[in-house]
Amino acid sequence: MGTHQPVAAKPLGDRELLGLLNQAASSLGVKAWVVGGYVRDSLLHRSHPNPDVVVEEGDALALAGRFAELAGAPPPVTFERYGTAQVTLPGHLVEFVNARAESYAPDSRKPDVRPATLEEDLRRRDFTINTLLMDLSGELHDPLGGAADLEAKTLRTPADPLRTFADDPLRMLRGIRFAAELGFQLAPDLIPAMRAMKTRLSPPVISAERVADELRKMLKSPRPKLALELLDDSGLLEVILPEISACKGVLQSGYHTHDVFGHTLRTVEATPPDLLLRVAALFHDVGKPATAKGDGTFIGHEDVGARIARAALERLRFSVREIEVVVGLVHLHLRPVFYRSEWTDGAVRRLARDAGPLLDRLLALAKADIAASAYPEPEKLDELQARLEKVRSERPSRLAPLITGEEIMAVRGIGPGPEVGRIKKRLEELVIDGEIAPDRAAVIDYLATHSQL
């Protein structure tokens, strides 16, 4: 194959990348195209650093090896069963594949893969906007009308949507995710097809991890409310998030202007694009259907909701750390909403202590919760935030533990047991309330001189 000069370890520009691909293909006599999201996003002027290369004539694995040599990259990672290879280089992950068709058996998550013509390969893809081709000189080719759909901002399947979704049911979620990311509309035949195919999203056909990955992208998108509305319209919501679907039709009173489901969507919409914050917004009122009394009250819904959120996120394979963040926010979400100017500094400190590292997200959730209703005093949260910043900046801090269980046992002359924990908690409360100075010696002195603590 001859010698070559390794490319410097910096991200390649589009022109350099195509040039190396063209050089590799020419040296092997291979006919290949860039296809899919890279081409779509280049037309939308969006960044897409990871091109997919489909080989029409030749060997995709050989092309990947030659490209890696020319790019000065490590050898390709190959997946011979599927005839694919990946080359990683700074700023890019380039995937190579021979033209193929693939489909899923009704009860399997593993695709059946077979060789195919380029047109067959394109027709088995998810949406026409992802069938656009770019030759290795950079020229666009559009065999299935993807450019017109891109211009019309429409998501359409290259084949009958029932066939397209049967080949890979995850495409139903991908379509909704693309709509939320790009602001596109679904072609009229997609929603009915999704309703007909919704049960195919369940395991073992589609794993919880793949579902959760699409859900994450929807929630991080610029239009999470649209995604949730489309999930509902298509019937997919009741399959992947039955807990959220159960919020539909649960009426609320007071300052609420929508049922629990409508309020939830507006709360998600009002949050900044922080994934775990948006997940918490999605689940913040999920306990209301189970706690509804019929009079507009939902006593304890934050505790019930925290348990429901934990179970749902475990099912969706979220990490333990992510689950703890979301569950903590759901459990605490009412605290800032209930704030009043009459709160003592001790009450403000307790909120700061109980929320800990969740505090900033908790305030953002409360602001979104209030914004999603007709609450008359949204500015009160600005006052609360100012007070929280003040108590968090106190030095020495009244929020840090100042005495240990061992010290309590030594001063009181008692052994281990519940009484030690009770005394410790009481001392911490007195410090938070300003009754004892935030100083270890002062706490020990108070303990020694107040036998009835």
Image (cartoon, rainbow, N blue to C red):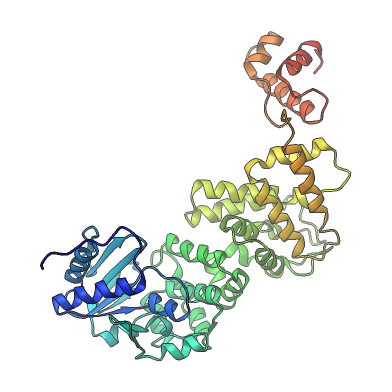
- The location of residue 246, given as percent across then percent down, is 64, 65
Where's residue 181, x and y in %? Answer: 53, 73
* Viewer-proximal residue among 12 and 228: 12
Q: Which of 138 and 37 is in front in this view?
A: 138
Residue 422 against residue 286 in the figure, above or below: above
Give the quadrant of the C terminus: top right
Direction left: furthest residue: 2
The structure residue drawn at horizontal position 42% and vertical position 74%, both measured from the top left corner, is 169
Q: Residue at image x 24%, y 64%?
A: 71
Residue at 38%, 83% in the rendered image: 163
Is 173 on the left or on the right of 141, as rendered? right
Q: Where is residue 321 in the image (x, y as percent from the top left)?
A: 52, 46
Is 145 in front, or is 311? 145
**Residue drawn at (54%, 81%), measured in percent from left and top?**
184
Residue 139 x/y as whole percent: 33, 86
Q: Is residue 366 in view?
A: yes
In which quadrant will I find the N terminus? Answer: bottom left
401 shown above or below 104: above
